[in-house]
Image (cartoon, rainbow, N blue to C red):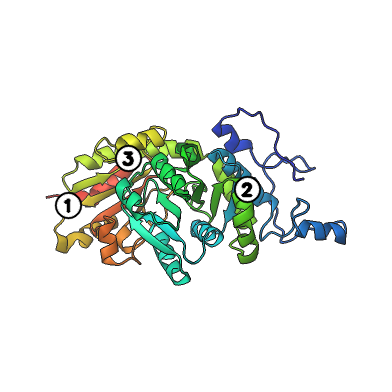
Amino acid sequence: MIPKTELPADVGLDTLAVREGLPPSAWGENSEALYLTSSFVHPDAATAARRFANEEEAFVYSRFSNPTVMMMERRLAAMEGTTGCIGTASGMAATLLIVMGLLKAGDHIVCSQSVFGSTIRLLQDFAKFGVQTTFVSQTDFGQWQAAMQPHTKLLYAETPSNPLTEVCDIRALSELAHARGALLVVDNCFCSPALQRPATMGADLIVHSGTKYLDGQGRVIAGAVCGPSELIDSKLMPVMRSAGMSLSPFNAWVVLKGLETLSIRLKAQSERALQLARRLEEHPAVSRVYYPGLPSHPQHALAMAQQSGIGGAVISFVVRAPDDRARAAAFGVIDATRICSITANLGDTKTTITHPASTSHGRLTEAQRQSAGIVQNLIRVAVGLEDVADIEADLLRGLDAVAP
């Protein structure tokens, strides 16, 4: 048996973020070891046969079992409050693994139309394999109910959504899914377990892009699925062994170390985001601000209940401009910045700024973008750890120029 870290049963989230994983090796290292090896040596042929047949728990081959990856998986599972976790090569690989592991031709998914653009494209692509998806309003529970079919197997939500920070009621969707024999999948990328733990509200599987807040410094691509160990071991692990959308040990180690500061980083970034959102809401060049921490947000009360009373670190806002100048106005604000990084990634200690309609959601049709509220004058800012006054001044450079 692979040993477990010995911790008191009642330790808090921040302790799990620093201590959970695997016990130190015989060398007694204090910082978790990085196991850069493709395979593992067995004492004899019979033992190797038992291990490859899953009759004996051991590390076999790093495509599907590696100590560093397991440390990250155990730590993230403990933080999310689940019994299992499987690391993947990216956040999109995590979603791919769920669809391949749980669905077959003839099955049906109900998904929020507000999820990440690549998620929409991926689910649409599975139509050619006989898996159909119905996209519904993130916030209209009636649409979720109406979309349910006898062969619906998954409900898929991202809360808060990217980039409009729409919030869905996790408990309500969980009850709907379970009443119909389906599973609820929640993408917890924006909040992470530092702010929100969907499993405690009834979600069955939690998807992560470790590239974002889990790493926290924009260094590696990584993903994960958290959920019941029985489901992960029986349905997802066999697909991982065959398909190999594996998380590399090095990337797992970077995420593992990022988890140690996740709570501190995200809370500090969220404080800055709230201050910036309030300032943007007052600016004459901004027609609307999307941020769950603001009372003006349509799901503010729900967000505060689900997200530990914290709005998160992502703000989106619409620049006031006529339709024929919408994209130009947004580009003008973005291009005027001197501190913010113009990149579609988020979760970094560096503040990033992007134009969703031409980047993260650029592969969607204009009709799809419009239905999801991704207008051409929308800008998304993922607030980092710089002095918030400097980020405010950076955005005002462009906003003041287009103010009416």
Q: Which mark is residue 157?
A: none
Taking the spot 57% from the left edge, 56% from the top edge, the residue there is 88
Measured Cα–Cα span from mark 2 to mark 1: 51 Å
Separation of marks 3 and 2 at Cα, in angstroms: 34 Å
Name the side, left or right, on which 209 lies relative to 396: right
Q: Residues within 10 Å of mark 1 (few under 14, many from 20)?
A: many
Amino acid type at image mark 1? Arg
Q: Is residue 248 in view from this perspective?
A: yes
**Residues at discs 3 and 1 in contact (Cβ within 8 Å):** no
Q: Which type of secondary structure does the marked residue at label 3 adopt?
A: loop
- Left or right: 53, with 131 as reference point: right
Decide which of tag 3 and tag 2 comes sooner along the chain: 2
**Placement of the N terminus among the 4 image quadrants:** top right
Q: Which residue is mark 3?
A: 292
Residue at the far bottom in the pictured view = 128
Figure label count: 3
Q: CA distance from mark 3 to mark 1?
A: 21 Å
Residue type marked 2: Glu
- Residue matched to label 1: 320
Classify mark 2: helix, strand or loop: helix
Q: Amino acid at mark 3?
A: Pro
Note whether 136 is above or below 265 in the view shown: below
Front residue (pair 35, 242) = 242
Name the outermost residue toward the left.
404
Q: Which residue is label 2 attached to?
A: 230
The residue depicted at 42 percent of the width and 60 percent of the height is: 119
Say if 120 sits above or below 318 in the image: below
**Quadrant in the rendering for residue 110:** bottom left
Q: Tell me the mark number nearer the camera, choosing from 2 and 1.
A: 2
What SS does tag 1 mark?
loop
